[in-house]
Image (spheres, coloured by chain):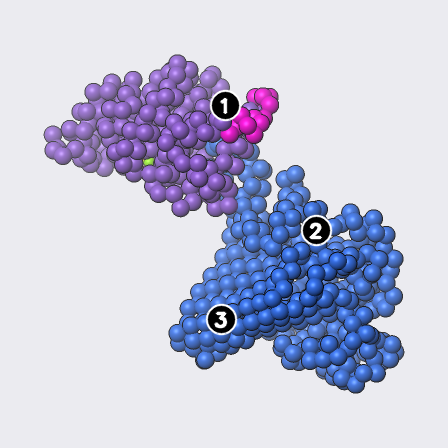
Chain colours: A blue, B purple
């Protein structure tokens, strides 16, 4: 067996030394609580290293190829022509838009003028420099310590990302689009977006996070989003991964949902070599609610891992979770759905489903529900399926004159429809539908 | 139009059809009756081209061509339609979408141009009226959550839309209430035409009072063992199938066994 501490030191070392080098130039460096936070995270990263398959949470997702590669944090954004970005935006999506190139905010490409009253949308780096006190107690509050090396790496730098705050009672009509662009051509771009979203009481907003590549180079994005939804707030997050087939994307969303508040999340994975989405939702007050949906459509040697954790900490909290996957080629998908219900969370109600459609004999799925229930008055249901298109349905459609290939495509599309229905905006839904049709040769 | 001769079919190594002959001419209606498990649905499925049936011998010619060479969708495009005994639920595919795809697939195979939205919709409305169906059915997933009777009615609605040359209705009457049976029968009768043939698989004479067949056949032990006119159905209603010898699971369908 490999000496693990030595191995960790080697893999993590290059990032730690870069951390040393740039620490004093990071936004808000010199402010003691910021420094302390980064320092602690860097120590934690040193201890944790990158996850290995010995770690239960990473048993089916091997990140050695990430750990061994020397990625390089870009501190200066690459220039991307606005026309390139315009071509990649979702048609008919009228949104406040923040664009990040390799993790760094690009004012030129973004569009955040005309914000309604009570709405703050700003780059995190800008806020750290101008008004860091607004961010105090906003890092690592939801889950406490970083749960894995990737989160720790992100926290060690806290470089840039989006800061969004919606004041009490404000209902933001236009969605906020967060577009993360991998733009560097050096095969080692590292982006560490850090987002903070705060919805004050009775406010609501819709976010669309997209990860795209504008080159064919390899990149690593390790993002952390921390979300606070106060009483009666409603947040809807659509997340779409569409990076190139060499790129790695490790995302973590930590959310704290208040009294009668609601978080709806939809994670769509279409692109990327390896995509891992961790979602941890703490239903932290009476009546808090979450709906976590996901759809992965993967091919070739793509690997996607959705790892969700819903913490029913209080009574009458509700969670609805439905992930669906369509796998072709030698693609591999992992789904882990952890639901935990505390003893005091009477009346908790949780439903979890994961359905997978295998279009090729070489595709593979590992799906694992994990229930930890300590209250007795609880409703909890879960179910997972892995299957193929139904022969009966195929014959039925062919007997109506529809060709075999088209029948398969239509049925595959129908499988995905249930999840797409729940996307936050019809323009996003249309866009994803078109992407999927295109991937499956339907249009 | 349809000529089946000496058809022998196995399913999973078990012989189901055992030298079946049947000839259907344009404009004719043939009823096929027979005990449970005698092979009626097997025959219907073999004509429609379903997988899993081994044709061991015999032939099926349709409009002069060897039907067994064709894929299910090719048969449909040449005018064959099967109303399923157990219509399949297809979550996520709206009824109207299936119909539109089907009609356009059939039309484009004939090098006709696709129906535009307006023509399609007016055709749909006509046929909905014919079968006394609500428009909301169009937007529901195919057969999903439909009652047994609604599924059967939906099959005939599809048939009305696709205007087949040869329709095989496999127990479309089972599960229909009395009023629905009347509506569905009227729908089928409205589709009767000199160049359209229909094969009705049924257990009940009642259907045949509404849709009067030219011929009635009894299928048992994988063969047509008797053929006659409409009066044969009445006779069967009286006597059941106990008179059938051999491996047939003779079973009475009538109130009194003759
Ligand atoms: N996949 C299969 N494997 C084995 N036997 C089968 C299979 N499919 C059909 N059979 C058998 O073939 C026989 C004929 O079935 P079929 O469905 O054609 O009967 P049917 O005449 O339509 O009966 P019913 O009146 O009950 O609808 C039955 O004995 C049935 O069990
Ligand atoms: Mg049958």
The mark that comes first in sequence, 3 or 2, is 2
**Is residue B174 in sight in this rendering?**
no
Judge if badges 3 and 1 mark residues of a common chain. no
Residue at image point 70% right, 51% down: A94
Query: Of tags 1 and 2, which is closer to the observer?
Result: 2
For residue A346, what is the image quadrant? bottom left
Image x and y of residue A443, in percent: 65, 38
- Chain ID, mark 1: B
Instruction: Give the residue pinned by disc 3.
Output: A287
- Chain ID, mark 3: A
- Chain ID, mark 2: A
Residue at image point 83% right, 48% down: A83
Element at label 3: loop
Instruction: Give the residue pinned by disc 1.
Output: B78
Q: What stretch is highlighted in magenta?
A: B109-121
Distance between mark 3 and mark 2 Cα atoms: 32 Å
For residue B150, what is the image quadrant? top left
Report the disc number at residue B49.
none
Image x and y of residue A408, in percent: 56, 41
Distance between mark 1 and mark 2 Cα atoms: 48 Å
Element at label 1: loop
Instruction: Give the residue pinned by disc 2.
Output: A94
Q: How crowded is mark 1: few (under 14 residues within 10 Å), some or many (20 or more)?
A: many
Image quarter hosting the C terminus of chain B: top left
Residue, far front: A117
Q: Residues within 10 Å of mark 3 (few under 14, many from 20)?
A: many
Image x and y of residue B158, in percent: 44, 31
């Amino acid at each position: 067996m490999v000496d693990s501490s030595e191995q960790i030191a080697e893999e993590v070392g290059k990032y730690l030394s870069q951390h040393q080098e740039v620490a004093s130039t990071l936004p808000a460096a010199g402010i003691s609580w910021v420094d302390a936070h980064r320092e602690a995270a860097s120590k934690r990263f040193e201890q944790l290293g990158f996850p290995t398959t010995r770690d239960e949470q990473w048993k089916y997702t091997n990140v050695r190829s990430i750990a061994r590669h020397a990625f390089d944090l870009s501190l200066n954004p690459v220039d991307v022509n606005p026309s390139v970005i315009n071509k990649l935006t979702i048609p008919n999506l009228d949104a406040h838009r923040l664009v990040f190139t390799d993790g760094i905010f690009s004012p030129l490409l973004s569009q955040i003028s005309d914000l309604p009253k009570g709405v703050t949308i700003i780059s995190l780096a800008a806020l750290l420099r101008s008004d860091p006190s607004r961010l105090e107690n906003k890092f690592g509050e939801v889950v406490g310590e970083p749960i894995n090396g990737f989160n720790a790496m992100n926290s060690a730098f806290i470089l840039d990302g989006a800061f969004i705050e919606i004041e009490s009672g404000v209902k933001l009509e236009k969605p906020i689009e967060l577009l993360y662009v991998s733009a560097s051509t050096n095969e080692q771009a590292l982006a560490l977006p850090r987002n903070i979203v705060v919805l004050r009481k009775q406010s609501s907003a819709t976010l669309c996070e997209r990860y795209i590549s504008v080159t064919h180079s390899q990149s690593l994005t390790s993002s952390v989003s921390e979300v606070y939804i106060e009483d009666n707030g409603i947040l809807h997050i659509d997340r779409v991964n569409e990076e190139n087939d060499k790129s790695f994307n490790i995302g973590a969303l930590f959310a704290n949902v208040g009294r009668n508040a609601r978080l709806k999340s939809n994670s769509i994975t279409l692109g990327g070599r390896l995509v891992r989405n961790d979602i941890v939702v703490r239903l932290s007050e009476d009546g808090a609610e979450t709906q976590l949906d996901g759809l992965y459509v993967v091919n070739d040697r793509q690997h996607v891992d959705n790892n969700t954790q819903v913490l029913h900490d209080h009574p009458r909290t509700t969670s609805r979770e439905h992930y669906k996957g369509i796998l072709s080629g030698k693609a591999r998908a992992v789904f882990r759905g952890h639901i935990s219900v505390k003893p005091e969370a009477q009346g908790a109600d949780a439903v979890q489903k994961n359905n997978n459609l295998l279009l090729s004999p070489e595709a593979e799925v590992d799906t694992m529900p994990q229930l930890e229930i300590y209250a007795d008055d609880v409703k909890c249901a879960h179910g997972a399926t892995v299957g193929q298109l139904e022969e009966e349905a195929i014959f039925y459609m062919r007997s109506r004159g529809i060709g075999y290939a088209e029948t398969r495509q239509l049925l595959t599309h129908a499988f995905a429809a249930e999840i797409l229905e729940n996307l936050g905006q019809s323009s996003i839904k249309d866009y994803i539908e078109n992407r999927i049709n295109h991937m499956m040769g339907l249009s | 139009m349809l000529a089946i001769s000496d058809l022998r079919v196995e399913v999973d190594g078990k012989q189901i059809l055992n030298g079946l002959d049947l000839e259907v001419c344009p404009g004719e209606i043939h009823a096929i009756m027979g005990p449970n498990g005698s092979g009626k649905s097997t025959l219907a499925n073999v004509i429609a081209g379903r997988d899993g049936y081994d044709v061991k011998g015999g032939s099926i010619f349709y409009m002069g061509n060897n039907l067994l060479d064709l894929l299910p969708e090719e048969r449909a495009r040449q005018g064959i339609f099967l109303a399923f005994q157990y219509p399949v639920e297809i979550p996520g595919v709206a009824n109207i979408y299936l119909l539109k795809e089907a009609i356009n697939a059939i039309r484009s195979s004939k090098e006709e141009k696709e129906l535009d939205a307006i023509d399609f919709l007016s055709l749909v409305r006509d046929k909905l009226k014919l079968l006394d169906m609500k428009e909301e059915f169009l937007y529901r997933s195919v057969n999903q959550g439909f009652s047994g009777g609604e599924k059967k009615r939906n099959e005939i609605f599809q048939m009305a839309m696709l205007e087949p040359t040869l329709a095989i209705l496999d127990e479309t009457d089972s599960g229909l209430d009395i009023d629905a049976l009347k509506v569905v029968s009227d729908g089928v009768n409205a589709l009767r035409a000199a160049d359209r043939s229909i094969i009705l698989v049924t257990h009940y004479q009642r259907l045949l009072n509404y849709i009067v067949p030219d011929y009635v056949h009894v299928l048992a032990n994988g063969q047509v063992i008797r053929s006659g006119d409409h009066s044969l159905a009445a006779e069967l209603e009286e006597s059941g199938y106990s008179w059938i010898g051999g491996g047939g699971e003779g079973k009475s369908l009538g109130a009194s066994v003759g």
